[in-house]
Image: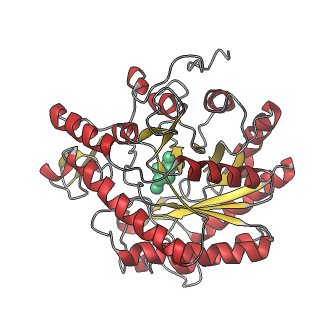
């Protein structure tokens, strides 16, 4: 076994075995009894997705890794309880469908959509606390943990929010499935960051119902990813996800050492199954051409079959005047172009793109066809977290991807 790999795949795994590992970013619930009650309730809830659906997605992702399909991942940074509406879901669904059509036509290959939806509620934070006007409160960690309102009671970590998150995820999935079925669209999948481990553990279910001794899958979403802040090879998130059969994503940021990446691949994909792992690179427009080549080469040399996807959002966030977060459309385009150039140079397929976007006409990212300026950001800024592309910007980006990646 690799010396850096602290997860021996021969060690028994069970849905709660992550609890023995160092854990980052999970909430600090005061009421442990309520937490246990909520976990028990969630364990009995119907799954959001089924194992054969996740297996089908894995097959599509394997095809994207071989350059025979293209993976389009998109949705809000964080789903919210306030913004929940049929319109929000339908607008995202429609925008992703239009983008898929554009890319499919341009690239001449099938596009597989996975929305950041029906479970994308928990957020990692760089700091545990947030200060405003001399007052310091716990950071907002997504609606499934606490509220974004800057008041002490609202920022408490509340286990009951997991029940509300599940209910909303179930209603969202119900509507998304109906939209897909009405259009004979069988390729619509959902994805989220598997961050909130108590919630994810409750949805770790046997692939064969009732067979607790066999394989498990994450029933909270088809595709689950590990964020850039929780990808430590010996950490709890990796310990949890290695036991699920779903296709998995790993965010790969500017501080990811090649040794960690290889350790993660051998832990999470010891059987070297194609489609199992999607590497989601988020390096920054100015750095992707320098930082990505050695990682792509290291993975290539390891013979691990992965699907490389570009997240051109997360390393291109800047503060506009007044401190509001934004992302310039041009930087997003540049990161995609850099990513594509690096992969082309290595002879590895650029397998897809991962976007923070909405189907609504928000004003959160600057630039794009509407020429949004920093002074426009206040008009319709809806995100409580990271800035999203609006529908017009997302479609323009799809056209750019469809043209082969040249800007
Ligand atoms: C995200 O995708 O919303 C996110 C937090 O990304 P990362 O882990 O890459 O920072
Ligand atoms: Mn985000």
Q: Is residue 403 visible?
A: no
Q: Is residue 142 above or below residue 111?
A: above
Q: Is residue 374 visible?
A: yes
Which quadrant would residue 143 be assigned to in this image?
bottom left
Question: Which residue is at the front of the view, 10 or 403?
Answer: 10
The residue lying at 43 percent from left, 35 percent from top is 210
Which quadrant would residue 248 be assigned to in this image?
top right
**What is the x, y in percent for residue 375?**
41, 78
User: How is the rendered protein coloured?
Assistant: secondary structure
Q: Is residue 30 above or below residue 397?
A: above
Q: Is residue 369 above or below residue 317?
A: below
Question: Which residue is at the front of the view, 239 or 48?
Answer: 48
State which quarter of the image contains the N terminus: top right
Count of marks, rendered view: 0
**What is the x, y in percent for residue 341?**
80, 57
- Whether residue 340 sits left or right of residue 312 in the image: it is right
């Amino acid at each position: 076994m690799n010396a850096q790999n602290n997860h021996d795949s021969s060690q028994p795994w069970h849905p709660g075995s992550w609890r023995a590992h160092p854990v980052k970013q999970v909430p600090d619930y005061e009421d442990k009894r309520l937490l246990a009650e909520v976990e028990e309730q969630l364990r009995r809830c119907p799954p959001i997705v089924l194992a054969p659906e996740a297996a089908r997605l894995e097959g599509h992702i394997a095809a994207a890794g071989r350059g025979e399909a293209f993976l389009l991942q998109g949705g809000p940074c964080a789903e919210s309880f306030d913004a929940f509406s049929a319109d929000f879901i339908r607008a995202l669904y429609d925008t992703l469908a239009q983008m898929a059509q554009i890319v499919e036509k341009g690239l001449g290959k099938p596009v597989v959509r996975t929305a950041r939806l029906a479970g994308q509620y928990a957020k990692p934070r760089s700091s545990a606390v947030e200060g405003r006007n001399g007052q310091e409160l716990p950071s907002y960690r997504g609606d499934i943990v606490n509220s974004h309102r800057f008041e002490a009671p609202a920022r408490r970590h509340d286990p009951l929010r997991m029940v509300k998150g599940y209910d909303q995820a179930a209603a969202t999935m119900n509507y998304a499935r109906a939209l897909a079925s009405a259009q004979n669209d069988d390729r619509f999948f959902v994805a989220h960051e598997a961050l909130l481990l108590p919630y994810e553990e409750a949805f770790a279910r046997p692939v064969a119902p009732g067979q607790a001794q066999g394989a498990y899958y994450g029933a909270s979403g088809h595709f689950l990813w590990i964020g850039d802040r929780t990808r430590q090879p010996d950490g709890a998130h990796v310990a949890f996800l290695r036991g699920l059969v779903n296709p998995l994503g790993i965010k790969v940021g500017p501080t990811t050492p090649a040794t960690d990446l290889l350790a993660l691949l051998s832990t999470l994909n010891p059987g070297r199954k194609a489609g199992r792992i999607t590497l989601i690179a988020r390096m920054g427009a100015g750095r992707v051409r320098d930082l990505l080549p050695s990682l792509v080469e290291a993975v290539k040399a390891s013979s691990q079959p992965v699907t490389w996807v570009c997240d051109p959002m997360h390393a291109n966030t800047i503060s506009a005047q007044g401190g509001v977060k934004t992302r310039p459309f041009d930087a997003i385009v540049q990161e995609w172009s850099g990513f594509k150039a690096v992969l082309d140079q290595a002879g590895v397929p650029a397998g897809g793109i991962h976007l923070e976007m909405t189907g609504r006409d928000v004003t959160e990212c600057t630039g794009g066809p509407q020429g949004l300026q920093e002074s426009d950001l206040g008009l319709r800024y809806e995100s409580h977290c990271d800035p999203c592309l609006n529908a017009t910007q997302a479609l323009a980006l799809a056209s750019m991807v469809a043209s082969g990646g040249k800007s």
